[in-house]
Amino acid sequence: MTTLLDSYREHIVNAHKQPLFLLLVGFITSFVFIRFSVRMIRAKVRWWPGNVTPGGLHIHHMVFGLGFLLLGGVGVFATYGGQPWMDWFGLAFGIGCGLVLDEFALILHLDDVYWSEQGRKSVDAVIFGILFTALLLIGYVPFGALPGEDTKWGLITVISVNALASVITLLKGKVWTGLLGIMVPGLSWIGAIRLARPSSPWARWLYTTRPRRRARALRRERLLHRRADRARTWLFDLIAGAPDKVPASHPAAHRVAERMAARASAHLDAHAARALARRQARLTDRRSAAAAGATAKAPAGDGPAYGATAAVPVRTHRAQQRRRAVRAGRSRTYAVGPTGLERRPERHRRLRTHTRRIRR
């Protein structure tokens, strides 16, 4: 215990890193506490207080985290960073970081996806924040050595190469290798040399013109990364709890909107099909009219053969009009063509006039 306290004074207090150390402690403690709390609430344990719902309004712990962030940030400026206020405000800022980043997925999606697959982004954000804070705590030299006049440029070169390799590893879709490579130099170098994951930005940029390399990446994804993903999923389930297969917190309004969108899509598909049928019917009518016009312009034949041939397109055109009206849902309309029916009213009028004259 004495050795541990002496190491703390030498590496933390004397190096003026105690506010940053307390920030990291508050970060980790708040994340562990809030995850334990939400898992107790999810399990509906009676002895646990539960959610904060004044007046029926569910207040997320992100709101309390914002309060701690404001307290720590404004307090440092208000006290000019003096001791011991700097240490307390650093602890408060770390607590706020843990509470806010635990609901990072909610801020990103603007939806309550805490217990869904999208909620895993919160765990990624928290782990990244803890690793970054720990990197700042141990200093800019990964190996823990103090840079001297002879080793300064060599260490800076190692740090620069390691940072570049970590960025390349992250672009290749290997998040954990890149994040751990920040703390462990050499791990990110391996990730930067190996093939990228098929869904990563690196693969989209460079593997589209290299089918063999993309095929190798897909084969490696099926064989190796699937096991790593299962291990990662198991670890995340242990830390943050398993997500819901179907999110229980999915708003009812979203479900109604999805059903309405599905119905609208089906209606649009039916409308497009009817419009296509109408276009095809109009095209057929135009072709029939053109054929009828060509038949009418042809030279007359001998006897009634030509008249019979010319009457066929007219009847076909009327039948097509009736069928098109039925498909469009309109009432049937029958056009009267030049078949002699329009002369019947004139004939009846002449007969009535002749009968009146006779009676007179």
Image (spheres, grey):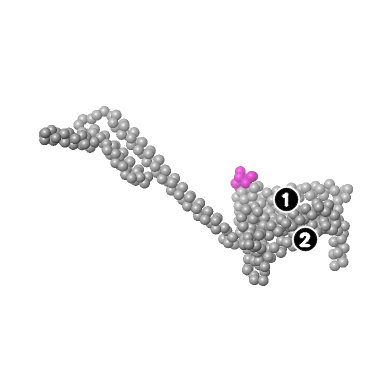
Q: Earlier in the sequence, mark 1 or mark 2?
A: 2
Dot 1: what SS?
Answer: helix
Magenta segment boundaries in residue numbering: 204-212
Density class for disc 1 (Cα within 10 Å; few <14, some 14-19, many ≥20) is many
Q: Nearer the viewer, residue 282 or 4?
A: 282
Cβ atoms under marks 1 and 2 closer than 8 Å: no
Q: In the picture, which quadrant includes the C terminus?
A: top left
Density class for disc 2 (Cα within 10 Å; few <14, some 14-19, many ≥20) is some
Does residue 242 appear anywhere in the picture? Answer: yes
The residue drawn where x is 36% and y is 39% is 284
Q: Nearer the viewer, residue 155 or 17?
A: 17
* Residue type beneath disc 2: Val
In this view, 104 is above or below 298:
below
Look at mark 2 in the image and give the residue it sits on: 25
In this view, 44 is above or below 113:
below
**Label 1, label 2: how many angstroms apart (C-alpha)?**
25 Å
- Residue 229 % position (x, y): 64, 58
Does residue 123 appear anywhere in the picture? Answer: no
